[in-house]
Amino acid sequence: MKRRGFLTGAAALAATPATARPLMPLYNTPRRLLSPPFVDGGGRELTLEDFRGRVVLLNIWATWCPPCREEMPTLDRLQAQLGGDDFHVLPLSIDRAGLDPVRRFYGEIGIRHLDMYLAEELRAMLAFGAVGLPTTILINRKGQEIARLVGPAEWDSPQAVAQFQSVISHGRN
């Protein structure tokens, strides 16, 4: 990219109010997504196929990741607000010690609305193409990736909720 084009694009982005930009810019074309097996809090083996028909916000995280720990209450509140037959927050832990640290962490900070899920770290990171934690992937009703964000976010902000409601009701499915 030429320097002038880059600077023009950067200036345009800087001129756009942050509130006008979506938290997770949607792709022009949905992307195919692999799904390694994972288990839920009861030990039942699942894949993303089990969530087909819902919009899913997949959050890959670990209890030892400080930014992951910080954003978890916002994911809990988002699930409380939007979770149901049409939308599900799927917090996929990659903790090597299993679900026990996840259970302790949920109890310590008062997580009440999120289910527990666990995947093998390397398998999940490779399958989902995650390069850092947390990695959050927005998945449409067909099981396709439509947006991604690496790093923490305020998932229950009015801006984020509005974006998810738009996707749930009529977008990118």
Image (tube, rainbow, N blue to C red):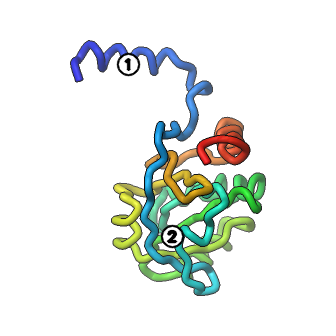
Which of the 4 image quarters holds residue 83?
bottom right
* Labels 2 and 1: the sequence-earlier one: 1
Which of the 4 image quarters holds residue 167?
top right
Q: Nearer the viewer, residue 163 or 114?
A: 163
Return the residue found at the far bottom.
43
Residue 101, position in %: x, y?
A: 54, 78
Which residue is pictured at 40% across the width and 15% down the height? 11
Q: Is residue 172 above or below residue 76?
A: above
Which amino acid type corresponds to the residue marked 1 in the rendered image? Gly
Residue 63, position in %: x, y?
A: 50, 68
Q: Is residue 169 left or right of residue 1?
A: right
* Residue carrying label 2: 93
Numbered disc total: 2
Which amino acid type corresponds to the residue marked 2 in the rendered image? Ser
* Residue carrying label 1: 9
Q: Is residue 145 left or right of residue 78?
A: left
Mark 2: which secondary structure? strand
